[in-house]
Amino acid sequence: MIDLQAARYGTREAYRFCWQKKGEWMPTSWDEFRIQVDVAARAIASLGLREKDTVAICSPNTPQILIAEFGAFNNRVAVIPIYSGSSQEQFDFIVSNGGARVIFVGDRHQYPLAYSYWKRNPENVDRIVVFKNSGIDIHSDDIVTIGWDDFVRIGMDAPEEMHRLVQRRRAEGLPDDPATLIYTSGTTGKPKGVVISHANYDAAMEMHLKALTMVSDRDLSMAFLPMSHILEKAWSFFCLTKGIRIAVNYDPRLIQETIHEVHPNVMCCVPRFWEKVYAGVKEKIASMSRLERLAVRRALSVGRRRNLRYVRLGRSVPAMLEKEYRFWDRRVFSKLKNAIGIPDPNMFPTAGAPLSDRICEFMRSVGIDVKIGYGLSETTATVSCFPETDYTIGTVGRPLPGIDVKISAEGEILVKAPTVTPGYFRNPEANAAAFTADGYFRTGDAGYITGDGSIVLTERVKDLFKTSNGKYIAPQALESRLAENKYIDEAAVIGDQRKFVTALVVPNLSQLRAWAGSQGMADADTEDLLADRRTVDFVMSQINEVQRDMASFEKIKRITLLPNHFSVMNGEVTNTMKVRRPVVARRYAREIEAMYAD
């Protein structure tokens, strides 16, 4: 694919990258990208890797990930992406289970993981390659680590026989060759290596080319989510397939700055991104004058009518409504889009967790096409997404063409498609449990299919819990609602076999301190502030506002405020920020029991 695109686009930009804050974004052409991949392929062959071997990549987003991946693919070598923030235990398990003999790491934060693994398993590691080796102290006894420049030099100096070896391997490549082993973090148990074959990716690309007709090679995407996440990985491959330029965002903490420098018009997102945008917009509106608020309210009313009642359904927009919408788009919506950093938005695939209907409707009303979708690592990302028209908010869209979805008798979503994994790596027990007798993959998600074929997610099957009164609660849906509130950063809903529902809440401390200042508590330290009855009552009042229209048995009755975010390192959340409920229940057992004490 890289060679074909280079022949088609030549000197046109393939990707751009900036290493540091306030640095310059440097473009790379398709011709240059092809050469980079060829050099990486020869280097990988020179390191002694054979067909069906694996390499691991643990790094923040950087173009070297794509270069190394396609270099590996040219050798029929599979790639294991590892989250850059993984713990040593996670890193060790994935590298060992996947059998990676060459490990690519991003910078000084990931190098210690690879070095520590090599020290304990020297016979299992042939090479460690550091993408960004500035600022790294390579240990004096480290005889396997080289920098990216050294790796490139190996490829450039490789003899002609290595070039011929790569060409032969590529020619002999088969659709069923593994391309990626992506380890699911899972909310319970050890990670499982999902095998994604080249055939899986090919099928996914074909489906998306048919479904996403609104994008073109004139678009610019920002790779903001980790490239170890299946959504960003598959989306990046789609962008390359379509010829969409990619701006690779190195530090996700700087997204608010980089999005204003790059102005992407397509970008895959997780709901948390839009939740923060929405909270910021609400705060801005609250600070406006009464007249300004009235104008915004009118603009949103017009946007909702135009985009949800007409455009959403593929109906012709009445001329007067269109004229008024254009007026408010210039006066209000364009300023909002500029403030976010997306002045010319096309569409933004969003998945990974539930996004509240209220936020989805708001973004659609102002002209930001948040395209809700649903998928898993095991399905090579997308199972379903909003079509261009006739989508229903509250659903995750309709299955892509070629994907067969049905609901089991127990309410679980089952999927059969050419994008579904052939199985888990070296895990026959997991494979036996993952597929039905007739070949459908068990997603682990509960849901149902509407009359028009749209999928509605209710909850992860394992996350659904029942109160002692026999009422079922869907905690993720409630947690996504809470995330709309500017005073709440994270929440874990509790209630399995309990009399009522409670929650562990991580507040947004900056917002909470602003409120505390207005209450004469500005000098309180964090622990005292969160324990203060006035603070707890205030946050509870915010929660009550969010859950006002819910049934009584669904509502959170008591809360405990926590000073620290749930941690990936401590195993409290997955790398995709899904709550690991058994771990949280154990870690905060004392706080949970206190909420049910009387």
Image (cartoon, helix red, strand yellow):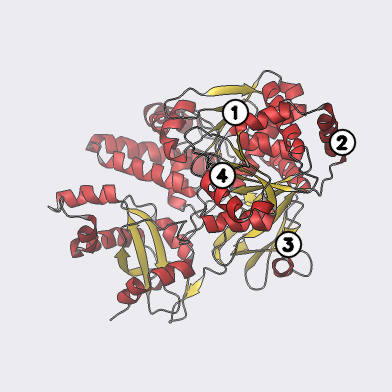
Q: Is residue 310 above or below residue 517?
A: above
Q: Which class describes the residues within 10 Å of circle 3: few (<14), some (14-19), or many (20+)?
A: some
Q: Is residue 424 above or below residue 462?
A: above
Disc 2 element:
helix
- Secondary element under disc 4, as helix, strand or loop, is loop
Residue at the left extreme of this rendering: 520
Of residue 495 and residue 126, the one placed in the foreground of this image is 126
- Residue sitting at x 76%, y 22%: 7
Q: Position of residue 249 (x, y in %)?
A: 51, 34
| Tag 3–tag 1 contact (CB < 8 Å) | no
Question: Which of the two discs, 3 and 1, sits closer to the camera?
Answer: 3
Cα–Cα gap, marks 4 and 2 = 37 Å
Element under disc 3: loop
Name the residue carrying label 3: 426
Q: Which residue is mark 4?
A: 141
Q: Is tag 3's residue or tag 4's residue first in the polypeptide sequence? A: 4
Which of pointers 2 and 1 lies earlier in the amino acid sequence? 2
Q: Nearer the viewer, residue 517 or 538?
A: 517
Tag 2 residue? 168
Question: Separation of disc 1 and disc 4 at Cα?
Answer: 47 Å
Q: Amino acid at mark 1?
A: Asp
Q: Residues within 10 Å of mark 2 (few under 14, many from 20)?
A: few
